[in-house]
Amino acid sequence: MRRILAFLLLLAIRAPAQTMPIQHVVIIIKENRSFDHMFGTFPGANGATTGMAGSKRIHLGHAKLTGPDLRHGWNSSEEAIDQGKMDGFYRYAPHYEAYVQFLKTDIPKYWLYAQNFVLADNFFSSIYGGSFPNHVYFAAADSDEMTDNPVGDGHRPARWGCDSSRGTKAPTRDPSTGQISHIFPCVNIPTLPDELNAAGLTWRYYTATSTQYGYVWSVLDAINHIRYGDQWSTNVVPVNNFTTDVQSQLADVTWITPLGEVSDHPEPNLSLCVGEGWSVQIINAIMNSPFWNSTAIFLTWDDYGGYYDHVPPPTVDFYGLGIRVPLLVISPYVKAGTVQHGLSSATSLLRFAEKVFNLPALTQRDKTANNLMDMFNFNQQPLAPLLLTPRKCPQIKKLPAGPMLDDNDDGD
């Protein structure tokens, strides 16, 4: 009997470790929504239906599917957070426009993903500023001290990165002094694509082309050695190609940023209903592909967009964390129907990919980030696809075209 037990123990010791079923990581980055704004009424989540405006507590109103685009740069974020009191959102948004939220009936498809897969309610953007530095963090776990969107000669440039027009500048802040400087938004910092290359792994960045609204979120344009390297023409791919490509190919790590019209960006001329429908089409394409059973999808929003949230962001370093945003985790191996409360941030998505593919951390941020593995059960029977049908969206009254608000509100 002892020999049998010893033999079984030896087999257990020699048995190979369980193969990681996740072979593909997909990161979908949408625009400008806080957690309470989107999921503040979700059952079991740490949401709020009232908010503080200075010393006044007010009920969160019913958000519209269109606009407005509120200020949400570094200074606005600091005003909103107000040293952790989370009561300053009214200071940059007249008529309490920041104090609104959606209900289940407004975002039914996002709600279904949250009910059937995983919703994270303690997930934070990377930095106090707006879209540009937060998008850089999604690729590099760093922004090279850039803290707000690039600005041109008194106007908002159409391109953010190495393709920016001459004279474009992005504000930086020294972490030891807080001093503001400015640089051309074309930098050389290590990125997750670099690590994937070194390990012989594949990546694709699906995004808007230079002539499409949304190219500002094509953030690898801001990484000099990628923008002017061979992979710019092979690995940075038009986002409209994705639903066709995924039927036969999917990189080890894929980033997807939408065209502006379907980005969920708050604007009077755009509807969140249409943006939700695009998300459904992208996720359906993955679920209908040969890769569903080996994929983890992370759907999140880049920053809070100026909208109210009641949870003070933890301070991990000089630059953040930024204000809380939603994260939906969709995979055959997630713990279905759960709300995950563990602290995490946008750099956790990089840490997850690094864990899956056995890659080193890029910075201290992703090195110490929650790797999100506790959201998964790799021993469970894989979940079936949840194929949804995009809604028929109500017509919106088209207003005269105008630029989005400049997220850089430093006033310098």
Image (spheres, helix red, strand yellow):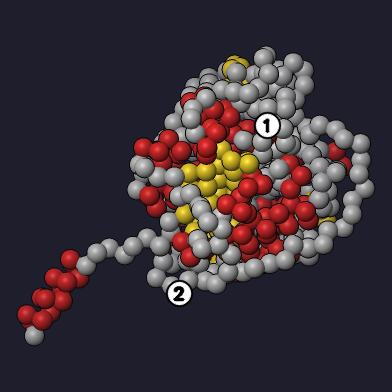
Q: Amino acid at mark 2?
A: Gln
Residue at image coords 51%, 63%:
290
Can you identify the residue that label 1 sits on? 210
Residue placed most toward the observer, 326 or 82? 326
In the image, residue 44 above or below residue 357: below
Residue 292: horizontal and vertical position, in percent? 52, 63
Dot 2 falls on a residue whose secondary structure is loop
Can you identify the residue that label 2 sits on? 381
Residue at image coords 74%, 37%:
213
Q: Amino acid at mark 1?
A: Ser
Relative placement, left or right, of 389 versus 375 is: right
Q: Which mark is residue 140?
A: none
Relative placement, left or right, of 250 versus 149 is: left
Mark whose residue sits in front, 2 or 1: 1
Neighbourhood count class around disc 1 (C-alpha, 10 Å): few under 14, some 14–19, many 20 upward: some
Residue 389: horizontal and vertical position, in percent? 72, 66
Neighbourhood count class around disc 2 (C-alpha, 10 Å): few under 14, some 14–19, many 20 upward: few
Question: Would you say residue 341 is visible in this rendering?
Answer: no
Question: Would you say residue 245 is visible in this rendering?
Answer: yes
Relative placement, left or right, of 216 versus 62 is: left
Residue at image coords 8%, 85%:
1
Residue 129: horizontal and vertical position, in percent? 64, 33
Which quadrant: the C terminus? top right
